[in-house]
Image (cartoon, rainbow, N blue to C red):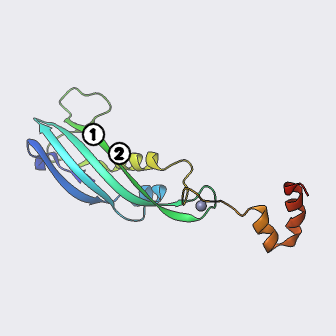
Amino acid sequence: MVFYPREVPQGTSSRSEKATLDAELARDCGLAGPVDCELSFDRSGGRIRVSVEWDCTVAQDCARCAESFDLELSGSFEALVVPESETVDEENLVYRDETEKVDLGNVLYEEILTSVPLMPLCRQDCKGVLGVEQLVKIDPRWSALGKLKSGN
Ligand SMILES: [Zn+2]
């Protein structure tokens, strides 16, 4: 997700983009395709505030049943992009001159990574791996365990 400050007019403007991440970063996120992004710019002098709304699909393994599934993710973030000549705090992205490209790819990558739940579930009521009853049907040797559990 790249833009050039010289292409951003003063005041507000916006554009949509199908952003692609660096292949390695995309793999880290489990990203299969591009990320749909809506970029809104608010420029005052050299300072450009960028608001990004994004959504994408990532491949995840269910924390209960270990099946892989597609997870829809979406979010938004803001970044302040300022010329190097202005005093800035470290949070901001900096450009040296108007023709230099500003890459928001790493910010987007961090946003996607932190949006992936710690325990992704293929569905909210996923029963997870087989219970004892189902295991007995597959292999009767599990029946001893089944009796133990049911108290017979
Ligand atoms: Zn599952």
Q: Secondary structure at mark 2?
A: helix
The three-letter amino acid code for the residue at tag 1 is: Ala
Residue 116 place in picture, x, y as percent: 48, 50
Near mark 1 (Cα within 10 A), the count class, few <14, some 14-19 or many ≥20, is some
> Who's the residue at 15% across and 45% down the image?
5
Number of marks present in the image shown: 2
Residue 54 place in picture, x, y as percent: 32, 52
**Left or right of 38 in this view: 75:** right
> Who's the residue at 15% across and 40% down the image?
42
The three-letter amino acid code for the residue at tag 2 is: Val
Screen quadrant of the C terminus? bottom right
Front in this rendered view, residue 74 or 81: 74
Residue 101 place in picture, x, y as percent: 21, 49
User: Which quarter of the figure has residue 90?
Assistant: top left
> Which residue ends up furthest to the bottom in the rendered image?
138
**Earlier sequence position, callout 1 versus callout 2:** 1
**Left or right of 59 in this view: 17:** left
Front in this rendered view, residue 128 or 61: 128
User: In this view of the protein, can residue 24 be seen by the observer?
Assistant: yes
Front in this rendered view, residue 135 or 99: 135
Please state the quadrant of the image where ligand 1 appears: bottom right
Q: CA distance from mark 1 to mark 2?
A: 9 Å
The answer to whether the residues at label 1 and label 2 have Cβ atoms under 8 Å apart is: yes
What residue sits right under mark 1 in the picture?
Answer: 79
Near mark 2 (Cα within 10 A), the count class, few <14, some 14-19 or many ≥20, is some
Q: Is mark 2 within 8 Å of ligand 1?
A: no
Front in this rendered view, residue 85 or 8: 8
Residue 100 place in picture, x, y as percent: 19, 47
What residue sits right under mark 2 in the picture?
Answer: 107
